[in-house]
Every structure is written in structure tokens, then in C-alpha cells.
Amino acid sequence: MKTVFSGIQPTGEIHIGNYLGAIRNWVRIGDQIGQNAIFCIVDYHAITIPHAREDLARLTFDAALANMAAGLDPNKITLFAQSHVPEHMELSWIFTTQTPLGNLEGMTQFKDKSEQHSVLAGLLMYPVLQAADILLYKADTVPVGEDQVQHIELTREVARRFNARFAPIFPEPKASIDQSAARVPGLDGAGKMSKSKNNTIGVLEDQKTIWENLRVAPTDPARVRRSDPGNPDICTIFTYHKLFSDLETLQMVNTECRVAGIGCVDCKKKLMEGLMGTLEPIQERAAHLRSHPSEVTDALVSGAERCSKIAKETMLEVREAIGLLPRNSLRPA
Ligand code: SF4
């Protein structure tokens, strides 16, 4: 059976781009392979850029809550926090000792992030920790966005190098890019929806805030007056309709926009109906989890227990392969 590993950034602020671009795919994977779908809230990755210590634990909890509300069912899949399984760090160190510095300095994400933040050594080692995350569970598939493909290639190299030098322990995992994943444009219409661009619609945002942001979002600039015909094909709002509205609404907007039969405000109100139809059940689940936090903490505890078991087995093999003195050999029973 396949093992799939994916990392989740510790933020509770998931947006519809995350939901349609990744989480829905993860839910599908969980339906297919159950507990072998391993989702890890990567709190150790989060501290590779400066973070607020008073927020980290809450954000880790919130990430679990938000992703559970959006459909990840911990009774089906495995969900845990990276720092609860210390073997991630141990394997990461071993891989660090085997990874040429040049391979890390050439990573696109490192170059981009080091322009925005002061460069901590952890930022450089980020892809090595990612390799450890994946290989600790001998995952063969890693669902990622295009921007992570280079890191998965490095993971494959790390596995290859280790296997050749010590023992054939690790599979070479494949990056899996979900081609059916929706590419969700940002509210400003200027590229991908992204928290850093401040152009998101939050999955857990209240209806009033979503409407305030949607109401002022740009549409087809040709529609200066209500009577000006528009072109839905170049309008972000129509892209959202395709993702959230029913076929009847979609056809109506497609026709009426072109003949100025519908105004942009009414078009956006129609979109709100479809959007909230998707978001309300998620928000209700989030509210339930917020008032029953033990459902989230229990999920994290059992996820970490399951992962610890696998991680310990892998580390026994790894330690032996690299030739460490086994502690339990010092006082034989
Ligand atoms: S009517 Fe709708 S699709 Fe057409 S320009 Fe306005 S918001 Fe966009």
C-alpha cells in the first residue's frame, strides 16, 4: 500500500486557494489509503523564519482544527505535529551530514526567502528537514505544488545517496502534482491567491468580512457603468463562480454579463450564495471543534503515537546502517 506524506504550515488561516488547491485532494487521498495518508503540521519548519513564541502553539493547534474542519478526518488519516515526533530532527541531522552545501544554496525557495528574511542556518537546512519528514515514514508519494518539486528532487537525491553509501532503506518518493487542483486567483486578480499578497478569501472568515472584500474586488474594467457589457472570461469573479456556483448560475452570468443584463454587485451577491454554501459547513465544523478542543488534541495525540512507532523503527535501521553504538547493547539483558 502507498504511503503519502504532506506537510501543513502551522497557520489556522486557510484560504479557498488552499482548500481547492490542496485540502480537497488530501481528503480524496485519505479516502483511498486511510491512515497511510500522513499529514504533519510542520512547526519545526515554521521557526526557520523569525516567529512569535507566544503564537506558535496556538497556530499549530489552529492548523489542526482548520484542516479537520475542512475535511481531514483523523479517524481515517494520520494527523500530527512534527515536534511531537523528535526522530524528525535526528534523521534531519544525519541527512545534513550527508548533503553537499551547494545543493542547498541552489534551492530557489532558499534564495527567495533569504531575500525577505535574515538568513538563519535553519532556512538553508529546510529541505533536508523536509527530506527527513518524508523519508522517516518511507513515503513514496508527496502531493505538492509546483514550487516544491525542487525540494522533492532533493529528497530523492538524499535517499539515493544514503541508500548507496549505507543500506537500501529508503524509497525515492515521487512528487505528485494534482492536475485537477483548481488554480485560484487572488481577490485582486493579480496572480495566485496567497496570504503574503493579502488577496485571500479565508475559509473560516465570517460572511460580513468576505462580502466586504468581495464587494470591492476588481471585475472586467470595461464595465465602467452598469449598462456596459462585460467579458466574464477575463473576470476573477467569474472564475470563482466556476468553482463555487451551480451550472444554472454559471450559465446565467456567462450570458447576462456579456449583454449588461446583470450588474457586478448582483453578480457578486450570487457568488456569495455558492461560496457560503461551501464554506458554511466547514465553518460549522470549525465552531464545533473550537468548543470541543479535545477532539483536536486527541487527534494530535493518536497521530503522534502512530507516527512515533513508525519513526522509531526507521531510526533503528538508520542508526545501525550508519554504524552508531546501540545504547541497548551496552547492558545486554
Ligand atoms: S457581471 Fe460578473 S462576471 Fe461580469 S464583469 Fe461583473 S463581476 Fe465579472
Image (spheres, helix red, strand yellow):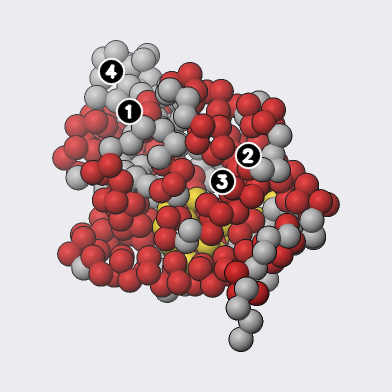
Amino acid marked by disc 4:
Ser
Amino acid marked by disc 3:
Leu
Query: Is 64 drawn above or below residue 297 in the view shown?
Result: above
The residues tagged by marks 2 and 3 sit, at their Cα atoms, a distance apart of 10 Å
The residues tagged by marks 1 and 2 sit, at their Cα atoms, a distance apart of 26 Å
Q: Quadrant of residue 50?
A: top left
Of the pair 109 and 193, the residue shown nearer to us: 109
Amino acid marked by disc 2:
His
User: Mark 3 falls on what kind of element?
Assistant: helix
Write down the residue under mark 2.
151
Write down the residue under mark 4.
227
Measured from the top left, where is residue 301 in percent x and y? Answer: 37, 69
Of the pair 125 and 171, the residue shown nearer to us: 125
Residue 198's tag is 1
Which residue is at a point 36% across and 61% down the rendered structure image? 68
Residue 43's tag is none
